[in-house]
Amino acid sequence: MAINYKDPSFLDGCKKLLADLKPMTWRQRVDHIWSYYKPHMVVGLVILVAIIGVISMAFSAGKETLVSGIMVNISITPEGRNYLERDYFEDLGGNKGSQEISLFSADFSSLENGTYQEDQYSASQVLVGLVTGAKLDYMLLDQFAMEFYIRQDVYFDLRDFFTEQELADLDAAKRVIYAMEEGTTDRVPIAVDISNAEFVKENISAEEKTFFAISGNTPDLKMCRDVYERIYKWQKPAQ
């Protein structure tokens, strides 16, 4: 069963977490989140899809975030990042003084062997910032992150994003990742393999495959669609 983000008990828990984090230093915040979630499940994807975007506070000095994403365990070329951030912002005609596009990175690959390395703190600080922020629209995940994401019962149903025919075509190409609704036989499409996109082939390095998923709270679906299509519209620059 997916988490109900409108459930008062869930929202109260998020508010309590925010109140607990507020007086702490960055490192104390990371330690607190790690200690709180580790007994339940691996920290990475839980925080990413269960909490990010629930608490409504401005993350970046009052700027309006046009679209925001996070890459988990993924490396991207400078050109690729510019394409999804700077160039995209310019194409949208964004106002640099009051608007922005955000693309965050987090590396939880060390969790694969059950460790939490010192050098993971920088990535965790990004997550703490997102927890105390409010907006996450889409995610780019590697195979390892995807395997954890599918187990979490916190996801966005892509039947509300793609048309029935689009999903059928993607499914026929074996590119749709499904999760099972607890207690039912319903398969919920939660992510799409985008490894075949030229943009991914030329600009992204990930373990095995790269997946596109949508944040489980209340993302801007129009902008998510725009990002998805932008990834497939990319063309390799002429030499």
Image: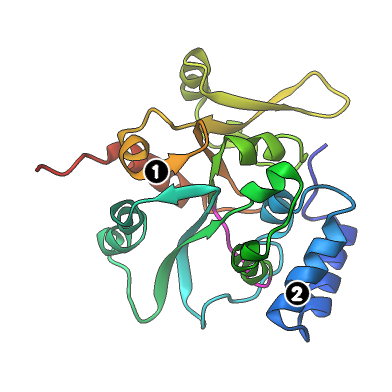
Q: Is residue 161 left or right of residue 91?
A: right
Q: Which amino acid does label 2 sit on?
A: Arg
Of the 4 image quadrants, the one containing the N terminus is top right
Residue 169: x and y in percent read 46, 17
Label pair 1/2, CB-CB below 8 angstroms: no
Region of the chain picked out in magenta, as a range: 132-137
Callout 1: helix, strand or loop?
Answer: strand
Residue 190: x and y in percent read 63, 34
Q: Mark 2 points at which residue?
A: 29
Answer with the quarter of the image where residue 27 lies: bottom right
Q: Mark 1 points at which residue?
A: 204
Residue at figure coordinates x 55%, y 48% from the top left: 73
Q: In this view, does 83 lie to the left or right of 54?
A: left
Q: Which comes before the other along the chain, label 1 or label 2?
A: 2
Is residue 204 a member of the stretch shown in magenta? no
Q: What residue type is labelled 1?
A: Ile
Of the 4 image quadrants, the one containing the C terminus is top left
Q: Is residue 88 above or below residue 224?
A: below
> Alpha-carbon neighbours of circle 1 within 10 Å: few (<14), some, or many (≥20)?
some
Residue 223: x and y in percent read 44, 51
Question: Whole-Å distance between the Cαs marked 1 and 2?
Answer: 30 Å
